[in-house]
Amino acid sequence: MKKFFKLPGFIFLVIKIAFLALTLIFFGSCYLGYLLAETYPESVGKEIESLRDFLRSFSYEMSPFEIFLLIFLNNSIKSFVAMLLGVFFGIVPVLFVFLNGLIIGFFAKFIGSEIGIVTFILLLLPHGILEIPAVILACSYGFWLGAEFVRDRKNIKKHLSKAVFNFARFVLPMLLAAAFIETLLISFRL
């Protein structure tokens, strides 16, 4: 039975289950964010507006390459840190996915009310197809690290190196492509 838990197929199964669970958490928190923004429009609206102003100031003052670097580094570093902090029982990756979904739900309510929810989803879709799954995949590895820390603490360095390798192999290319697409959308003000 112990051999079963060391098989690559088992590791893939844990990652797959974590990915599905985190995806459900993400969509659930998007919905919750939308409902909270609907229930408390003034408090959430002020925060969203200040965040929008902050983001707009960057996009007007930066070159497309600087925007690309900012997006790529921001997403990569945050996803990487969330993955590594998963070693502490997988809590941080779950919170990271939950909070990202909540923020998207807030934006969906406020920006969706300005431009229409369908238009908002269409604008989110191009970079969301790569960026959101990449972040969830990184957090799935973090959740797996938390499970491995509980199950096999003495080999945690080996598990960490496997997670880092897979982050570089799968997550970084997805975040790179997502940053490129998002930069195009911002640069052309689509």
Image (cartoon, rainbow, N blue to C red):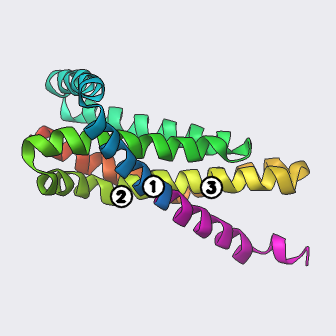
Q: Is residue 65 left or right of residue 149?
A: left
Question: Is 54 colored magenta in this rendering?
Answer: no
Q: Amino acid at mark 1?
A: Ala
Q: How many numbered marks are there? A: 3
- Disc 3 to disc 2, how far (Cα)? 17 Å
Q: Amino acid at mark 3?
A: Tyr
Q: Are marks 2 and 1 in contact (CB under 8 Å)?
A: yes
Q: In which image quadrant can residue 27 be found?
A: bottom left
Residue that sits furthest to the front in the current view: 39
The residue indicated by pointer 3 is 141
Q: Marks 3 and 1, Cα distance to the nearest angstrom?
A: 11 Å
Q: Residue at coordinates 60% horizontally, 58% vertically from top-left?
A: 166
125 or 99, nearer to the observer: 99
Label 3–label 1 contact, CB within 8 A: no
Q: Which residue is mark 1?
A: 134
- How far across and down, in percent of the image, does residue 65 sit? 25, 35
**Residue stretch in magenta:** 1-23
